Image: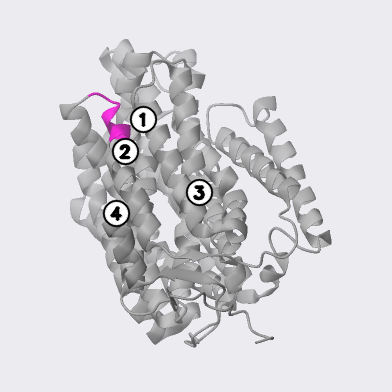
Amino acid sequence: MTGTTTAAVRPRRGAVGAGANRWVVLVVLCVSLLLVALDATVLHVAVPAVTEDLRPGAMELLWIVDVYPLVCASLLILFGTLGDRIGRRRVLLLGYGCFGVASAMAAFAPTAEALILARALLGVGGAMIMPATLSILRQVFPDRRERALAIGIWSAVAAVGAAVGPLLGGFLLEHFWWGAVFLVNIPLMLVSLPVGRILLPESRGDRSGPWDVVGALMAAGGLFGVVLGVKRLGGAEAPASPCTVLPLLIGAALLVLFVRRQRRQLHPLVDLRMFRRPAFGTSVGCIVLAMLALVGLELIAAQYLQLVLGLSPLRTGLRLLPLTVAAMAAGLAGARMLRRFGPRRMVCTGFLLTAAAVLTLTAMGGSDNAPLLLSAFVLLGFGLETTLFGAYESMLSEAPADQAGGAAAMGETSYQLGAGIGIALLGSVMNAAYAPGLRSVPGVPRHASRAAGHSLGEAYDLADRLGGPAGAALRQAARDSFVHGLHVTLLVSAGLLLLGAVMALRLPRLMHCGTEAVTTVELPAPREVAESRVSA
């Protein structure tokens, strides 16, 4: 059977996607993704409790929060391509084990350093799990129509996890200590390991030639440096600080060397020729642009709701909940929209809807306007998920089946990189628009005005210390400057989204729904599953 990528099926193994097994596999994969998405946000509400208990320094606290996404983003390509080589289920199950052990370490961490190490191991486990779930989904659903529905469910679960994380964390903190936000992962992982071992299919890509270990380490080091530098650009360090510039330059140099190495390799870790396909390269670019335009904006919106409108953290979460519900609805309806409109119109329309939502938010002022926020957040969630759904589906469908892990890793890496760049870029725009309004406030000392220009929270602290008319003037000036900065940031974000709509015009007009060839995929036969359950 030369000329085809379909490998011979082993005896007593079912064909890929046969029967209802593939939908059970989807449930297991979605549970895996839910845990990783939860852990990315569940710590946010626990930071004050962690600070009170472990007494970390400012730099240690920064690493406690940032080390998980930093390590996870750095290792996605490494573990995604390793799964193509040694088996995606094997890497996924190893990720389950690593995630469970790291969760126990984090829950009972006695010091800030131990918590940083545990969070780094959680990042390693997350990097094993995330690309494996998407690449197994790519293999189990060879038919593009069914795969589109599966990706919609998968992306809706990711939206749920990100939104439920802070709510779950808040509930656990009200009844238990801060370690409970990590301890909740352990029973789920103890269930996922045996269930995944029995139900998930094993799949591999092309195993000819050696695995490029040096290339994998270069990619990991390069991404670590770039993501770290980008995070520092959006943080408190000055842009010219060596702690910011040096990792950025080293990371960029390693990534350039990685690309040159892959072009010379007979058996490359990542086949960069995939980017020659307009749909693949454009899809990756759309993912980066969508996250770049919106992730930093989400953080600024949360500050607006709490510091300008004075809402509590719980009410802030409830105000943002319609965004998540709309994203879930778009994910579940994504397959039908893709069949009807095609990738080009779907992604382009998603960008335009999101830009319209962002422009609607420019009407926000210093007073609460609940109907405006509700309508804008619903439009924002629906448009963003429509964009990401169409881009992810096009990217996976364009990638060769034997490189599904590498393609999934590139998609997740572009997501993380876009998010990091967005926080840095929009944060810098916000600071540049916010600070000038506080340089000269009547009755406020010059040094206090300069310090108030760092952030709205710091301005409020200074206003409370000053008190009297000077404090009230500083508070009002800070509120007005923040709202102005928010409007400028929204306009920049809208411009990026419109650029994404133009970029999406390179995507295919129609969705081609053929059944595609796949590589070796092992699905347990019913008799083997029954025997394994009996022996257990």
* Residue 201 in the image, given as x and y percentages of width and height: 44, 65
Q: Which corner quadrant of the image does residue 367 belong to?
A: top left
Q: Mark 3–mark 1 contact, CB under 8 Å?
A: no
* Residue 287 in the image, given as x and y percentages of width and height: 52, 61
Q: Is residue 290 above or below residue 98?
A: below
* Residue 242 in the image, given as x and y percentages of width and height: 70, 26
The amino acid type found where label 3 is placed reads Met
Q: Is residue 484 left or right of residue 516?
A: left
* Residue 181 in the image, given as x and y percentages of width and height: 29, 33
Residue at the spot of label 2: 186
Between residue 365 and residue 226, name the one nearer to us. Answer: 226
Can residue 516 be seen here?
yes
Between residue 477 and residue 200, name the one nearer to us. Answer: 200
Classify mark 3: residues with Cα within 10 Å, few (<14), some (14-19) or many (20+). Answer: many
Q: Is residue 374 above or below residue 366?
A: below
Residue at the spot of label 3: 128
Reading the chain from its start, which is encountered first: label 3 or label 1? Answer: 1
The amino acid type found where label 2 is placed reads Ile
Q: Which corner quadrant of the image does residue 335 belong to?
A: bottom left
Q: Mark 2–mark 1 contact, CB under 8 Å?
A: yes
Give the magenta range.
177-183
Residue at the spot of label 4: 160
Front tag of 2 and 4: 2
Can residue 158 be seen here?
no
Q: Is residue 463 left or right of residue 128?
A: left
Reading the chain from its start, which is encountered first: label 3 or label 2? Answer: 3
Q: Is residue 415 above or below residue 147?
A: above
Distance from Cα at disc 1 to Cα at disc 4: 24 Å
Between residue 173 and residue 365, name the one nearer to us. Answer: 173
The amino acid type found where label 4 is placed reads Val
Residue at the spot of label 1: 104
